[in-house]
Amino acid sequence: MADVEQKDTVIVGGGPGGYVAAIRASELGQKVTLIEKGDPGLGGVCLNVGCVPSKALIAAGHRLQEAKDSSTYGVSKTDATIDFKKTQEWKQKKVVDRMTRGVKMLLKKHKVEIIDGEAIMDNDHQFRVIKPGPKQFMDNDAGRTITWKNLILATGSRPVEIPNFKFEGRVIDSTGGLNLPEIPKELVVIGGGYIGSELAGAYANLGSHVTIIEGLPSILNGFDKDMVKVVEKNMKKKGIDIITGAMAKNSEQDDNSVTVTYEVDGKESSIKADYCMVSVGRKPNTDNFGLDMTSVKLNDHHQVIVDQQGRTNVDGIWAIGDIVPGPALAHKAFFEAKTAAGAIAGKNTANDWVGVPAVCFTDPEMAEVGMNVDQAKDKGIEVATAQFPFAGNARAVSLDEPDGFVRLIYTKDEKNVVGAQIVGPGASDMAGELSLIVNCGMNVEDVDLTIHPHPTLNEPIQEAADIALGLPTHI
């Protein structure tokens, strides 16, 4: 049997949570070891096959649309075309590979030991690191055996696979959707959440006819209906068909196409497409590395139960990111990573945010943080809202993107902002300011007294505060 290796702080998983935890732990004086199995690699799903490459495709689609028609600005139409092979090469080499090299450089700079392989838990005190791949022929003596002073689990999540839609051939998950060899003429997207809606918009801009099949009454469930309506209006302009209240039943494929059968109100229909992308959610990776061999407790959603610093019920084992409760977002994992690393170092850190900002890169973009009106009411908080339209913002109008609005949700008594929402141009870049406002418990007067430069897309935030104070300027 191999010798047992004693480590200080060990992190399993090199995604947004894992690599940030490694860097912060090293900065705080810990000797850090990072275990990464290489699929998808350092940077995790987000950097390799998720949020970063998807934004690259979204950007490419926008550029194509601008090149095809900028007549609004007096720019003559051209016969713009796209070399998708070159687009995919740019996305991979100039965006993904560049960013992953940056992560590797940062880990090296912070003297983090990286072990390539997959961690398989043996008990509450040790695991083995083995080569990735089939394990049915592995025995208990295989791999390196490691114990730790502190262990941070950051194993991430994976796409949910639904019955009769096995990920193979022309039935793909979001990873497959980002790496298609050509732009499909017809694309079916099952699941109208933020992943499905973002990629549906991206491929519509690239020239695909897209159909979204969503089981709920509306796409983008979780965002307020009036926000979603702005996005749906733009989708319909692009020719995207949205079928809600639909249950995906079956898929049949050949070498050139896939036929998707779905049911609405008891009636079955079929769509033939080049590809079918399934994006109905993600499941935490808590079932595939021997966690059941430990005493670590999970909730009913198979997520690891942790306290505000990321501690599990087992001394010395911590968990962060997609495997713990809360939204499966990279920036949440960043925060939790710093909290756990700080707590291990004896710092008074905590995951005590008021709200985690959520951003959806649709056309137009959406962002929100904190509570909406219904959530506030459920908590017995009396709130009011103030809303300013981008149609009254000079910068949005000059960009020919006047659709959407900014909304502040604040308490009726003291006018403290408990939630904020944006649907419109640049929403993703303004989400940070909204997060600051909500998480700092700012009053609408604080927002109103913050000078916003003119003309910018941020001004509607201040304009909404004006309205909340009963002193509207530009409406």
Image: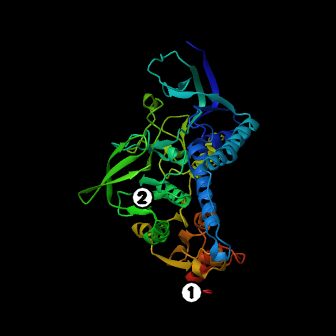
Residue name at image x 35 percent, y 50 percent:
260
Residue name at image x 42 percent, y 58 percent:
211
Q: Quadrant of residue 218?
A: bottom left
Quarter of the image for the C terminus: give it. Answer: bottom right
Identify the residue under disc 1: 470
| Image location (x, y in percent) of residue 453 | 72, 75
Specify the farthest residue to the top.
Answer: 1
Distance between the alpha carbons at the discs numbered 2 and 1: 44 Å
Please say if 293 is above or below 364. Answer: above
Please say if 47 is above or below 3. Answer: below
Q: Which mark is residue 242?
A: none
Residue name at image x 56 percent, y 79 percent:
388
Q: Quadrant of residue 356?
A: bottom right
Residue at disc 1, secondary structure: loop
Q: Which residue type carries mark 2?
A: Thr
Specify the farthest residue to the front.
Answer: 79
Q: Which residue type carries mark 1?
A: Gly
| Image location (x, y in percent) of residue 32 | 67, 33
Front one among 454 and 472: 454
Identify the residue under disc 2: 211
